[in-house]
Image: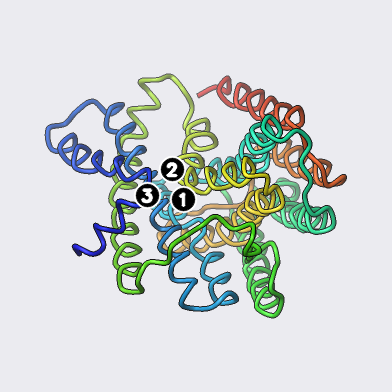
Amino acid sequence: MARASKYLKDNPMSFLLLVFPVVILAELVHWPPMVIFILSAIAIIPLAGYIGESTESLAHYTGPRLGGLLNATLGNAAELIITIVAIREGLLELVKASITGSILGNLLLVLGMSMLLGGLRHGHQAFDRRQASSNAILLVLSVIILLIPSLLSHYIGHVEPPDDKVETLSLGVAGVMIVLYALGLIFSYKMTKTPLTPEPPEETALPHKAWPLRVALVILAMSTVGVAFMSEVLVGVVDPVVKALGISEFFLGIIFIPIIGNVAEHLVAVQVAVKNKMTLSVEIAVASSLQIALFVAPALVFISLLMGQRLTLVFNQLELLALIAGVLIAALVSADGESNWLEGAELLAIYIILGLAFFLLPL
């Protein structure tokens, strides 16, 4: 345990761990829900970062191919934990919104920030055009599969609440997507570099000192437990926070939950862009979106069934339009293999406009 604490000091966000005991105190003395929500969200950020770092360290011991698979599996662990807790509490709209928000956040917010800050520092930046276009096409196809239940369910049966036929369609699509994800991992194992398990070239990777195996395992376990506990606290105050702020549960799920769960990964994408490593930055954004579409979303459908809930892959019209716009924009941006700060600003502008529309949705 002492050795683990020594390695925690290497992370610049370590000081945020001090919020963890404050959250426990806030729960015990019944602080206002808004304060508890903010504090628990802050506490999740460094814990999610440590899940990623410990996974990176484990990858050093498993080799590049198995390490890529490990990163793919645990890449969105924090958000998966939060959404599982939300499913148990019956907040299904928040869960579906977080799926949409994660994909949009990676394609518009993360790519936008990366291109903006990288472009301001380096002017025009280049990335691997063929690889980026190939990944973008795969992302478009994956999101189209994800949207099929939304487009067809209204012709099959009653959607809200879902009847048996609608739920069967979602389960069938989710099953096919899990199989596709597994096939993608098998393909990734034979190829050294694919969007599902991106292995950055040595010269483009951020410097990372591998922790000893035991330390990495201890930190991974502690971080996972910590995220689970903080998720319980966070989800437990969603209803009073929504009522206090006068915002919708949908807005909370589509904007805040994805940022809270993935902020560490987002920062890495921006950092490598500022270091003029745009190929890696684009890979991080696209790979995370693919994992959400092909693994997290369908996995949540089956998890909800095990928990006695009925989560379907039927999204509302605004989500559909936003997802279609997001993946098309990502494909267009990838087409020329170049980026600049103006393109980044435009991506951020689209994200802000969509955020405003989500905010104005009725409760």
Which residue in the protein does label 1 denote? 79
Answer with mark 3 or mark 1, whichever residue precedes in sequence: 3
Helix, strand or loop status at disc 2: loop
Residue positioned 36% across, 43% down in the render? 13
**Marks 3 and 1 in Cβ contact (< 8 Å):** no
Residue farthest to the left?
29
Please rate how many residues cluster around mark 2, counting C-alpha atoms within 10 Å: few if below 14, some from 14 to 19, many from 20.
many
Residue positioned 63% across, 23% down in the render? 357
What amino acid is found at the position of numbered circle 3 in the picture? Asn
From what the image shows, is residue 224 above or below residue 27? below
**Comparing labels 3 and 1, the label whose residue is closer to the camera:** 3
**Comparing labels 1 and 2, the label whose residue is closer to the camera:** 1
Point out which mark residue 175 bears. none
The quadrant in which residue 63 appears is bottom right
Which residue in the protein does label 2 denote? 91
Q: Position of residue 295 (x, y in %)?
A: 59, 62
